[in-house]
Amino acid sequence: MKRWLKLTEGSTWPRPALESDESVGVEWKLRHAPDTLTRADQLLAASVMSAYGYMIIDMTQKRRNAVCREIRQQLEDGTAGSYNDSALEPPVYVHYLPGEEVTL
């Protein structure tokens, strides 16, 4: 299963988990089997939280609607994640307090 969606305007978003997905998603692992989480799962979960914050706080309603519309369209068309995931770095969002040291 592809984990990232690349939109036509160039932004990258975590792919929403769907009930129709064949594999167990990160959400299920977080709730029921946290000991099975991989580092990739943890990074995906962090990206989902960050993307949610960005979408709710920083985006205009017009831009948010456009992003949601394209994500839905890719999922419906089956084109979601139709590129090589390994060649695409997930977005990294870092939130920290001023003066706090951050090591990536």
Image: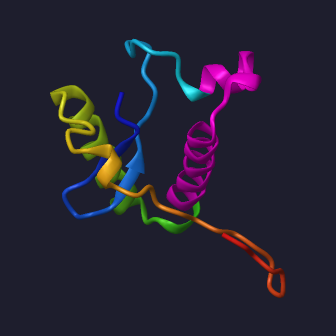
Rendering quarter of residue 2: top left
**Image position of 81 (left or right of 104):** left
Relative to 104, residue 81 above or below: above
**Image position of 73 (left or right of 48):** left
In x, y percent, where is residue 12? 36, 56
Q: Residue furthest right?
A: 99
**Image position of 86 (left or right of 98):** left
In x, y percent, where is residue 46? 63, 49
In percent of the image, x 73 and y 15: which residue is there?
32
> Is residue 10 or residue 29 the one in the foreground?
29
Magenta stretch encompasses residue 53: yes
| Magenta-colored span | 27-56
In x, y percent, where is residue 75? 26, 31
Rendering quarter of residue 9: bottom left
Q: Main secondary structure of the magenta part?
A: helix
In percent of the image, x 20 and y 39: which residue is there?
82
